[in-house]
Image (cartoon, coloured by chain):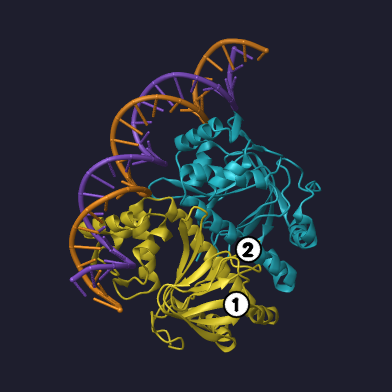
Chain colours: A cyan, B yellow, C purple, D orange
Amino acid sequence: MLIQTTIRSDIVNRPNAPAHAVPQAPNRALDRSSEVNSLEQSMLLMGATMSYPRNTEIFGENETADYLYQVVSGSVRTYKVLSDGRRQIGGFYLPGDIFGLELAGEHSLSAEAITDVKVLVVKRTALNALAARDATIAHQLFVRTSSELHRMQNRMLLLVKSARERVASFLLEMAERAPRGNAIELPMSRQDIADYLGLTIETVSRTLTSLESDAAIQVPTSRRIVLRNRSALSRMNG
Amino acid sequence: MLIQTTIRSDIVNRPNAPAHAVPQAPNRALDRSSEVNSLEQSMLLMGATMSYPRNTEIFGENETADYLYQVVSGSVRTYKVLSDGRRQIGGFYLPGDIFGLELAGEHSLSAEAITDVKVLVVKRTALNALAARDATIAHQLFVRTSSELHRMQNRMLLLVKSARERVASFLLEMAERAPRGNAIELPMSRQDIADYLGLTIETVSRTLTSLESDAAIQVPTSRRIVLRNRSALSRMNG
DNA sequence: CGATGCGTTGATAACTTTCAAATTTAGTGG
DNA sequence: CCACTAAATTTGAAAGTTATCAACGCATCG
């Protein structure tokens, strides 16, 4: 059985910030930073940094999953292509996020660089060996897998809603993950968003336009979105 | 952060079979049965059996998650109700399946008995204590959480598809989980199926009728479905 | 029986996709 | 730096899919 697991760091660096930058967010991550650091520090010690240009593949579905990745800078998407050509995006990974953790031997999704990307690459066998003798590391892996499961459950709830609700949820999710006040800098295209939400690009575009005319958001450029009324967006979330 | 985790046993007993029955399936579960048994046997030793009548609550969203449950007989659904009254079903649990494993203190979904149900109830603290001193148990918990994540990912793929594809996937999933040849005995109502697939009962009903007229299935009674052409159903799966 | 719950079927409305075209943005070479 | 081409996004109109509203059938249960 193939498992594609993704782990989100509690400490999300700003896009393009150097990997070793101290997170400037004065948020809740601090109260368990020591735990977070032990896994992240281990990865930093064991890992090598790799660069991938925009739109290149990091790993492919069904390749052996020998490595685990953490985004240093840039953004990554994982995806699956169905037999009829439709593409479903599994997730977006921002700096600090971990992706590509497989339980079994093969990746169940492919991963691509959305922008030029730097990733920290860690050998899976090395991390497993560490987890075997360090219960803290093992626990963190478990916790993060569980977190990812929780995220999936929310995603599941999202996917049964209307286009408007899906887009609103997506915007709130992105705003939470890369906080810059009320503005969001989207690294991904409309097509990526559409394939993430299970909609078409036209529907995503129209929905954004509609949210803008309702004064819930503002779209100064296609990749930049300002949240004008978060509570309205939250209400759409069900 | 609230985590609702669910674990599916590799050994799925037939509905209504006694908990201690030796699984009669001559399938792939055997090659790691010793591992599977150690968790299941531990639960059996530590747990107490409880009964819940049809349509009663086993636990509620936001209740403290002190226990973990394994279905002995009957079927269970987990669900979440959105603020506008819509209900999304998180999963169906058949005999052998484990549900209600939370990472944090509270359940993120509610659980109800679909039919009269017997469940094995295990104190979470007891199982955690066991996992702390038995790496095999801890590993099994991790593996099963990962498995659940994998199932969620497939579910995610399912939810972006058409009504026909969703229903086909649902039928194949149920057929795989409770194998009785080509017939499926559904414990849940059309409303449950609809809330699981993110559709309305009318659409589910019409889709079943349509699949029947295409000779892909046969619906002798509303709760009993015979798969007549699995490859046709699989093709719909993308 | 009559009431009630569940499932099916029909007609219509709402929403999303599809197909097509216009517009804006980004990238490239002079 | 500007002009040009290609790519991405937005907008429009029509078609397709699913939801909604309504009615009917069927079984169960008091």
Above or below for C10 versus B179? above
| Other residues around mark 2 within 10 Å, as few (<14) / some (14–19) / many (≥20) | some
N-terminal-most mark, 1 or 2: 2
Please report, as a chain letter, where disc 2 is located: B
Q: Amino acid type of disc 1?
A: Tyr
Neighbor class of circle 1 (other Cα within 10 Å; few <14, some 14-19, many 20+) is many
Residue B15 image offset from top left, x and y in percent: 38, 79
User: Camera-side residue: D5 or B89?
Assistant: B89
Q: Please provide percent x and percent y for residue C21.
A: 39, 21
Q: Tag 2's secondary structure?
A: loop
Give the quadrant of the N terminus of chain B: bottom right
Asked whether the viewer can see residue A57, the reply is no
Amino acid type, label 2: Leu
Q: Report if the CB atoms under discs 1 and 2 are less than 8 Å apart.
A: no
Front residue of B150 and A224: A224
Marking on residue B2: 2
**With respect to residue A35, does B200 lie above or below?**
above
